[in-house]
Image (tube, helix red, strand yellow):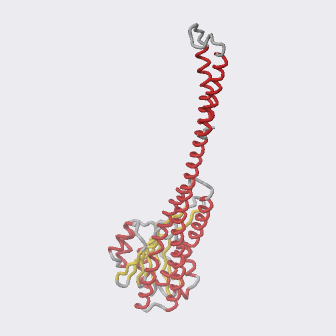
Amino acid sequence: MALVDNAIYVEGVRAATPDSLDETYEIMKANNGFAWIGLYRPSDEEVRSVAAEFGLHHLAVEDALKGHQRSKLERYGSNLFLVLRPARYLDADERVEFGEVHVFVGPDFVVTIRHAESPDLGKVRSRMEQTPELLALGPEAVLYAILDQVVDEYGPVVAGLENDIDEIEDELFDGDPAVSRRIYALSREVIEFQRATQPLIVMFESLQRGFEKYNVDLELHRHLRDVTDHALRVVERGDSFRELLQNALTVHSTLVGQRQNDEMRHLSETSLAQSEEVKKISSWAAILFAPTLVGTIYGMNFDYMPELHWALGYPFAVGLMVAMGFTLYAVFKKRDWL
């Protein structure tokens, strides 16, 4: 059901739990309290019913119906409209899941429209009902509690992202070829995380100015400043994560370049070694070829050849082959082929 929880609060205590929106509107008129309506993926008709009852601005209602909005705060007279992007870290998948919650706050109502499992608004309601002195401060107190829950749920996300970055730093020097893909994927998550968290600072500053203008209780001022400090730390961690990932990508590119250079140097050394071997083989082949050529010519068994019937012909041929071999050896040795 779209209506998750629905209650009327008077002086910080749950005075009624209507079963329908129509009943909520009737009880509100009879009691001097405020309504806190929690909706989960409501239909367009339910959103328009709430908008008509509480006089919500049509632009805010249009944003709530469309969804997929950036984090922002809009003020329409005495009403506030906030879009928050909560997040949670999924350990099994090692990824961040982002949600979206719309919050309408007026003098006598709070309406939350949640489109994902996060944040746990049931926990927020339970905590506020256990502190009636804070809940008695009105809808602004509920708004503070929702913001506090969203910022608190960023804590496990920061821890999960930090662990992923530590793993990437270890994988960088292990030569894992998949590390670049993981860096890019994690960078996208960090950028999305920054888009969700960075607007919070401006939103909190705007709320503080509004609290002063509309004379909101001093205790809520203090609580909101505390949440702002937590949000600042979260934003700073997101900025540092993005810088770390950029550095990791640079280091990865450098390491890949070094490995490629090492491979090219190894190939060059191998090629040079092979070239030296080819020189030696070619030199010995030439040295052996010279006497083979002379021996082949004198082994043709012709009768009419020079020096065949000469008494010194054989020693001359042998001497010629030896002389040619030594000459070639000396030439190749001088050129460092041998």
Q: Residue furthest left?
A: 58
x, y percent for residue 136: 51, 87
Question: Which of the 4 image quadrants contains residue 286?
Answer: top right
From the viewer's side, name the closer residue of 248 and 108.
248
**Is the C terminus in the top left, top right, bottom left or bottom right quadrant?**
top right
Q: Is residue 70 left or right of residue 157?
A: left
Question: Which of the 4 image quadrants contains residue 51?
Answer: bottom left
Q: Is residue 63 visible?
A: yes
Q: Is residue 39 visible?
A: no
Examine the rendered structure and indicate whether residue 289 appears above or below residue 228: above
Q: Is residue 279 left or right of residue 144?
A: right
Q: Residue at x 46, y 77 (%)?
A: 200
Q: Residue at x 59, y 47 (%)?
A: 266
x, y percent for residue 230: 54, 80
Examine the rendered structure and indicate whether residue 208 appears above or below residue 53: below
Q: Residue furthest front?
A: 311
Q: Residue at x 52, y 90 (%)?
A: 219
All told, the count of numbered labels is 0
Examine the rendered structure and indicate whether residue 253 appears above or below residue 9: above
From the viewer's side, name the closer residue of 45 and 60.
60
From the viewer's side, name the closer residue of 98 and 8.
98
x, y percent for residue 125: 54, 77
x, y percent for residue 197: 48, 73
From the viewer's side, name the closer residue of 206 and 115.
206
